[in-house]
Every structure is written in C-alpha cells, then in structure tokens.
Image (spheres, rainbow, N blue to C red):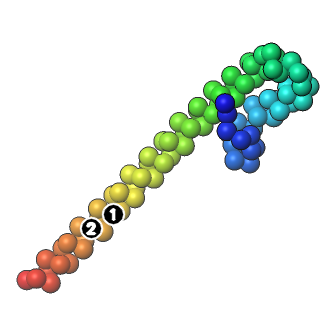
Amino acid sequence: MHPHLNVRRHQHCKQEILALIKCHQEHPYAKFWGKCNQVKWELDACFRQEKALNRAINSEKSKREKARYQEKLLSRSQEVQADDE
C-alpha cells in the first residue's frame, strides 16, 4: 500500500509516480496480476528514501529548536538569578 500519489507532495518521487500511473492506465486489468509490480517496488524504494531524507531534515530542525529553547531557558534563569540578588 502506498500513500496518495500526489506529485506536488512527493516531488522527489515524481518520475516513479508518473510511471506507476502510466502503467496502471496502459494495463487496467493486468495490473491486478502483477504487471506493474516492478514500477511499484521502485516507487516504494523512492518513498523510503524520501522518508529518510525528511526524517534527517526534521531531526536537524528539532536539534536547532531544542538548542534555541535551551539558550532561552538559560538566559531566563540567569535573569531570574540576577533579579534575586
């Protein structure tokens, strides 16, 4: 099973998506007996690569946000300590 084949959402896998859609259009009945399996496997591999790429991007974004939050927290605690003195 694959996600909705929205080319705008999955720009990284555009060629594979279009190839699968074309295969399904050219073989409306044979697709049920595995005619388009190789194209589907290539699309699945592309989706896995896209997911790994997105995971790495999100991880970096999360690290930056966490560092920014820790800086803000540290500066706030220093302000509170300065006010207490």
Amino acid on which the number 1 mark rests in the picture: Tyr
Which residue is label 1 attached to?
A: 69
Percent position of residue 8, x then y: 74, 48
Which residue is label 2 attached to?
A: 73
| Image quadrant where residue 18 sits | top right
Is label 1 in contact with label 2 (beta carbons under 8 Å)?
yes
Mark 1 Cα shell of 10 Å, populated few (<14), some (14-19), many (≥20): few
* Residue shown at 75% from the left, 31% from the top: 16
* Residue shown at 53% from the left, 36% from the top: 52
Amino acid on which the number 2 mark rests in the picture: Leu
> Relative to residue 64, is residue 73 depicted above or below?
below
| Image quadrant where residue 50 sits | top right
Q: Is residue 57 left or right of residue 42?
A: left
Q: Secondary structure at mark 1?
A: helix
Percent position of residue 58, x then y: 48, 48
Percent position of residue 5, x then y: 74, 40
> Relative to residue 50, is residue 77 depicted above or below?
below
Q: CA distance from mark 1 to mark 2?
A: 6 Å
> Relative to residue 20, is residue 80 depicted above or below?
below
Q: Residue furthest right?
A: 26
Q: Quadrant where the C terminus lies?
A: bottom left
